[in-house]
Image (cartoon, rainbow, N blue to C red):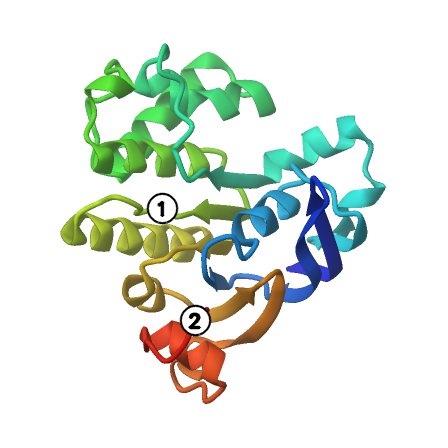
Amino acid sequence: MIRLENVEKSFRGRQVLRGVTMTVPQGCLYGLIGPGAAGKSVVLKTIAGLERPEQGRVYVDGVELRELSELELQEFRARIGMLFQNNALFDYATVGENIAFPLRRLTKHDEPAILARVEERLERVGLAGFSERLPAGLSGGQKKRVGVARATVCTAPFVLYDEPAAGLDPVTSQRIFELLREEQRRAGATVVMVSSDLERLFSVTDRIGMLHEGRLVFDGTTEEALAATDPLVRQFVHGLATGPL
């Protein structure tokens, strides 16, 4: 389970998160939505321990991240997979080296086991035989799939996705979302996914949280989000141009 309690975070004097309290149940695929600059990516980075809140507490699997030393936090991150919005692939490294990076950095697997795991992940995301290619030679959809393979290569029990299908065509986007849902169910992982593609996001999520101006203004099942009567939530979820967000 992931739990945020009254989390506040500011950057350069601007408050980005304002008392955010949210719970992601174990084994849940939780969609985090909201307008731009609402704080969605900051929530993901806070869960991953990449950002520390000024106030509040963050629990992942019962562990409060604020109580961990920097070394303990680095070790704990081995339990969290993350796909960044820009994929964050190393341009100078091959696809295989990119995917193997978390295994080499965070685990004690020997090299044959690492290479076998990389090949298994590549086959899983439909990129068998791509191990020696460089990111520069990949399409946008292929880069996303490499990012998914790297985020899931350690079989982390907690996975965070930031705009996993941004910039992709509708068909490729749907395939990415279906792959992520399949991976989540296969591993039984607890997943938080940020996406502005609400139609496809809602087709795979169990629960939805909505941020607005740094506050969590909705938290419920996907069905409850679609049926929400709160004007702010309804406007955003259904794309109604009834006033400014």
Whether residue 62 can be seen here: no
Using the image as rendered, state which of residue 14 and residue 98 is in the foreground.
Answer: 14
SS of the residue at dot 2? loop
In the displayed structure image, the side of residue 175 where residue 59 appears, left or right? right
Give the residue displayed 39% in from the left and 16% down from the top: 97
What residue is rendered at 28% in x and 67% in y?
199
User: Is 89 placed above or below 14 here?
Assistant: above
Residue type, mark 2 in image:
Pro
Residue 45 position within the rendered picture, expressed as x and y whole percent measured from the top left: 60, 43
- Residue 16 lies left or right of residue 180; in this view the side is right
Kindly indicate whether the residue at mark 1 contacts the one at mark 2 (C-beta within 8 angstroms).
no
Instruction: State the residue lying farthest toward the bottom.
Output: 229
* Label 2 packing within 10 angstroms: few (<14), some (14-19), many (20+): few
Q: Which residue is mark 1?
A: 164
Question: Residue 241 sits in which quadrant?
Answer: bottom left
In the rendered view of the protein, which quadrant contains the N terminus?
A: bottom right
In whole angstroms, how far apart are the C-alphas of marks 2 and 1? 26 Å
Eye-nearest disc, 2 or 1: 2
Amino acid under disc 1: Pro
Q: Is residue 54 visible?
A: yes
How many C-alpha atoms fall within 10 Å of the one at disc 1: few (<14), some, or many (≥20)? many
**Which label belongs to residue 213?**
none
Q: Is residue 187 above or below residue 26?
A: above
Left or right: 11, with 91 as reference point: right
x and y, in percent, of residue 40 in the image: 53, 54
Q: Residue furthest front?
A: 243
Would you name the residue on which mark 2 appears? 244
Nearest the viewer among 75 and 172 is 172
Q: Hey, which quadrant is residue 132 in on the image?
A: top left
